[in-house]
Amino acid sequence: MRNTQRSIPTLARLSAALSCAAVLSACQTTPPENADLAQARASVQQAANSPGVARSAAVELDRAQQALRRAETAWADKRDNEETRHLSYLAQRRAETAQAVAAQAQADTRVQQASAEGERARLEARTREADAATRTAQVAQSQAQQSRSQAQEAQTQAQQAQSRAQAAQNQAQQSQQVAEATRQQLQTQQELAAALERDLQALQAKQTQRGMVVTLGDVLFTTGQAILQPGAQRSVQQLAQVLQQYPERRVLIEGFTDSQGSDQLNLDLSQRRAEAFRQALLNRGVPNERIDVRAHGEGFPVADNGNAAGRQQNRRVEILFSDGQGRFIER
Amino acid sequence: MKPTISMLAAVVSAAALGACSSTPPAEPALAAGAASLEAARSAGAPEYAASELNNARSKLEQARALAQAGKQGEATRMAERADADAQLARARAGSERSLKAVTEVEAGLRSLRDELNRSTPVNPGAAPSASPLQAPRAPQ
């Protein structure tokens, strides 16, 4: 019913619409610039060109582009100034929103990176501190070991020094003991020598350059023979006792005659008389190796063979005592 | 026939219909704008994007006034712009806050580097290239 009623003005409106459409199509080919739209287009383009927006704010960018497309349509198709301004505003705001969202994402990423860098730095610092501590500990350990070695070395040296001091002390004591022993030995020898001298006084021994000498006179032998008279036994006993008391001493028995008779006879006699005295000492227990015998015949006279008294003095046996080592000083 | 009366009736009914079909109520747009505004407030916009937030609030009030005045179409558009402003305020608040965090964390990182470089004993044997604290690469 409404259609029939509106059928009359329809023609007029249709013609008007047609003329209007013609104008519109003309406009579409070369649309006039709209400032709001241009601004919105620039903003959306800028946002779309930002890699951060494409990555992090795709949804916001899409909404901005939708609004922009609607604004373009509103302007291109309807020249609707109001709607175009409105949609351009929305497009621009959403483009800015997209930029802000992208900026936040970038900032968040940077915060995470910086935090990670901080963690890494702390970790590396701790690692370095730990390494340094390890090195310090190693140094301290080696120093301690060195100190221990030095202490041990010092102790060893001290012990060695102590040992040396002990050894020196021992040596000193030994030297002292040796000296003491030597002194005592010397004293003993001197005392022994002195005692020997005293003991030999009884035998009328004489101190000569060769040592102590006991002389047995001619009267103690049977004339012209090598037999000891009984009176000689006392001298033999005394000599045997002295030799027993001084075991380090030895005796040299020397026989002499006067110049009467041949040399051979005299040598033989002096030999036999000395041997006879040796035999007497052997009989008293004196060992054979402590007795030496020498025959000199008429050699080494002690008196003048020109008279009877001198010849009697020359007929004799001398008993020479050795030194402490059993040695004799030869004629 | 009474063309005048019928014409009038037709125009009125058409106007009524047109109003009903082309200008829907502004209520959903107002609700959406209010929700975005609240979201922006919660995101710290009062502190970090005060200007954008004020824009949004002001537009939403205008939209409400327009709706009260029965101008549903204008109210809807105003509410939509308020919504766009509020979303921008929310995004700006987020980016500003994050940028501030970047500034703080980089300052912290610098002072940490300084401190570590000071406190770390210098090892004469270590090569200079061994320094682990290299300058951060500038964001491209």
Image (spheres, helix red, strand yellow):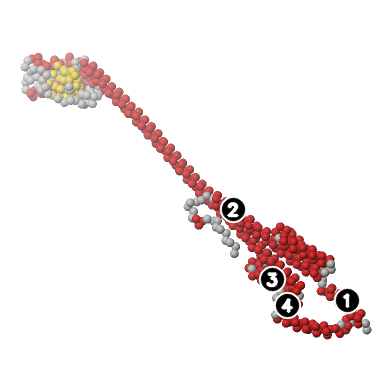
Q: Which residue is mark 4?
A: A76
Q: Quadrant of residue B87?
A: bottom right
Q: Residue A93: which disc?
A: none
- Give percent across and percent down for residue B3: 91, 82
Q: Is label 3 in contact with label 1 (beta carbons under 8 Å)?
A: no
Q: Residue at x 75, y 67 (%)?
A: B81
Where disc 3 sits, the SS reads helix
Q: CA distance from mark 1 to mark 4?
A: 31 Å
B24 lies above or below A263 = below
- Give percent across and percent down for residue A92: 70, 69
Q: CA distance from mark 2 to mark 1?
A: 76 Å
Q: Are marks 1 and 4 on the same chain?
A: no
Of residues A66 and A80, the one nearer the viewer is A80
Q: Which residue is mark 3?
A: A39
- Give percent across and percent down for residue A197: 22, 18
- Give percent across and percent down for residue A161: 39, 35
Q: Residue at x 57, y 61 (%)?
A: B137
Q: Residue B111: which disc?
A: 2
Label 2 or label 1, whichever lies nearer to me, is 1
Q: Amino acid at mark 2?
A: Ser
Q: Which residue is mark 1?
A: B12
* Quadrant into which the N terminus of chain B falls: bottom right
